[in-house]
Image (cartoon, rainbow, N blue to C red):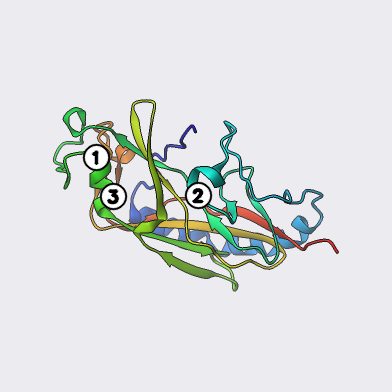
């Protein structure tokens, strides 16, 4: 499987918070119109639950997930009544601390960069329909890391939430916030904005669209 390396998702927690607050009204108004547009779509989810990555990897098998996966571009539709698992881009690090490169002033808590990330990873918060009256938040812990595997000389952590309850018919959004106990840098470079994640909670993804369809009789 070719990982999706997450880079520079947050310039700073403060800027992200201010930006979200400023755009909340406009975004909420736009989302209120989405269900009607989504209802007119002809596409429906495949009958089976297998989510395929762009390179053809069966993500359900790769992550050990039996429920429908929501997250990748080709896996953002489900049937009403189905449980679903939220996945999101993997996080990659240098394999070995001996060759790791860090920004000036950063000292890892563990010798190997992936061990450093795992030691600081507290979990995630999945927020559905953020900024609307239907907003709901779900918190998950370190078990969200489903698998750690090498690829192309780096090491990647792959994520998946515990099963979530079905959403109502129509268009929704789902947003992932990550929580770290301390700043983490990946050992792949010396640029903080590209190679580091901040301490605390921060937005790890944007508002990912997802559509739930009623089952045909």
Pointer 3: residues within 10 angstroms few (<14), some, or many (20+)? Answer: some
Closer to the eye: label 2 or 3: 2
What residue is shown with label 2?
A: 64
Compared to residue 14, the image places residue 55 above or below, namely above
Q: Give left or right: position of 138 versus 8.
A: right
Question: Residue 124: where, in percent of width, then height?
Answer: 40, 59
Q: Which mark is residue 14?
A: none
Q: Please count the marks in the image.
A: 3
Above or below, comparing residue 31 to residue 118 in the picture? below
Mark 1 packing: few (<14 Cα in 10 Å), some, or many (20+)? Answer: many
Whether the residues at callouts 2 and 3 have beta carbons within 8 Å, the answer is no
Of residues 193 and 74, the one drawn nearer to the viewer in this rendering? 74
Residue sitting at 27 percent across and 31 percent down? 189
Question: In the image shown, does 89 or 153 lie closer to the viewer?
Answer: 153
Residue ID at (28%, 38%): 186
* Mark with earlier residue (1, 2): 2
State the quadrant of the C terminus: bottom right
Dividing the picture into quadrants, the one containing residue 107 is top left
Residue 111 lies left or right of residue 46; in this view the side is left
The residue under the point 48% across, 32% down is 2
Residue 118 marker: 3
**Residue occupying image coordinates x 78% and y 62%:** 215
Q: Position of residue 13 (x, y in %)?
A: 34, 55
Residue 216 position, x and y percent, is 83, 61
Earlier sequence position, callout 2 versus callout 3: 2
**Is 151 placed above or below 33 here?**
above
Cα–Cα gap, marks 3 and 1: 9 Å
Q: Secondary structure at mark 1?
A: helix
Circles 1 and 2 in contact, beta carbons < 8 Å = no
Between disc 3 and disc 1, whose residue precedes? 1
The image position of residue 201, as x and y in percent, is 34, 59
């Amino acid at each position: 499987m070719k990982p999706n390396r997450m880079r520079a998702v947050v310039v700073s927690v403060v800027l992200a918070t201010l930006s979200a607050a400023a755009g909340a009204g406009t975004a909420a108004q736009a989302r209120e119109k989405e269900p009607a547009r989504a209802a007119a779509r002809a596409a429906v989810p495949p009958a089976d639950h297998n989510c395929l990555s762009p390179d053809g990897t069966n993500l359900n098998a790769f992550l050990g997930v039996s429920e429908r996966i929501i997250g990748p571009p080709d896996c953002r539709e489900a049937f009403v009544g189905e449980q679903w698992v939220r996945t999101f881009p993997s996080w990659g690090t240098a394999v070995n601390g001996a060759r790791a490169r860090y920004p000036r002033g950063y000292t890892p808590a563990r010798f190997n960069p992936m061990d450093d990330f795992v030691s600081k990873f507290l979990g995630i918060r999945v927020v559905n329909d953020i900024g609307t009256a239907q907003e709901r938040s779900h918190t998950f812990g370190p078990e969200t890391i489903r698998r750690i595997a090498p690829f192309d000389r780096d090491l990647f952590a792959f994520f998946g939430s515990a099963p979530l309850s079905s959403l109502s018919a129509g268009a929704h959004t789902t947003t992932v916030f990550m929580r770290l106990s301390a700043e983490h840098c990946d050992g792949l470079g010396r640029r903080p904005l590209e190679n580091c994640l901040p301490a605390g909670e921060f937005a790890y993804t944007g508002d990912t669209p997802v559509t739930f369809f009623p089952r045909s009789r």
